[in-house]
Amino acid sequence: MKSFIKVLFSVLALGLVAVAPVALRAQDAPPADGGGKKGGKGKGGLTVDRIEQAVGTLTADQKTKITAILDKAQKDVQALAPEDRAKGRDIQMAARKDVRAVLTPDQQTKFDDMPMGGKGKKKQN
């Protein structure tokens, strides 16, 4: 009986070791909708986190304003009819301009150096 319990615990322990990495990776996965509370889209778009990483610490007021700008832009793009998707770029550029206006001059310089659209292009002034 003791050997059966040892084997049972060994199998359970091996099962936990095999499943743990998968479970931990699932917790780190981004939300399926690509958005989240940080504003903007998930992949190459602007988010409060990406902006703060690029420009430095943002104030609570800046975060609130930027989140509202990014959320509105995302809703506006999603509301476009498929044949009007070209207007999405204009909406994103306007949102970028609005976000820039919320930043300090030093932050604006760093923001201008951020790549646009995740494709390595820099904003042209």
Image (tube, helix red, strand yellow):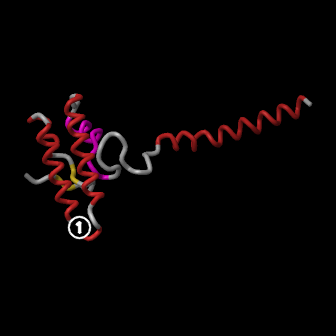
Q: Mark 1 points at which residue?
A: 84
* Residue 102 x %, y %: 14, 37
Residue 60 higher or lower than 35, as above or below: above
| Span shown in magenta | 44-55
Find residue 121 and report its image quarter. bottom left
Q: For the residue carrying disc 1, how many other residues have a C-alpha within 10 Å: few (<14), some (14-19), or many (20+)? A: few
Q: Is the magenta stretch mostly helix, strand or loop?
A: helix
Question: What is the secondary structure assignment of the residue under circle 1?
Answer: helix
* Residue 8 x %, y %: 81, 36
In front: 57, or 41? Answer: 41
| Magenta stretch contains residue 21 | no
- Tell me: 116 left or right of 7: left
Residue 88 higher or lower than 42, as above or below: below
In front: 46, or 80? Answer: 80
Write the residue at 77% across / 35% down. 10
| Magenta stretch contains residue 48 | yes
How many marks do you count on the picture?
1
* Residue 43 x %, y %: 34, 52
In front: 44, or 11? Answer: 44
Amino acid type, residue under disc 1 in the picture: Asp
Q: Specify the quadrant that holds the N terminus.
A: top right
Residue furthest out toward the bottom: 83
* Residue 85 x %, y %: 25, 65
Write the residue at 21% across / 33% down. 56
Write the residue at 11% across / 34% down. 104
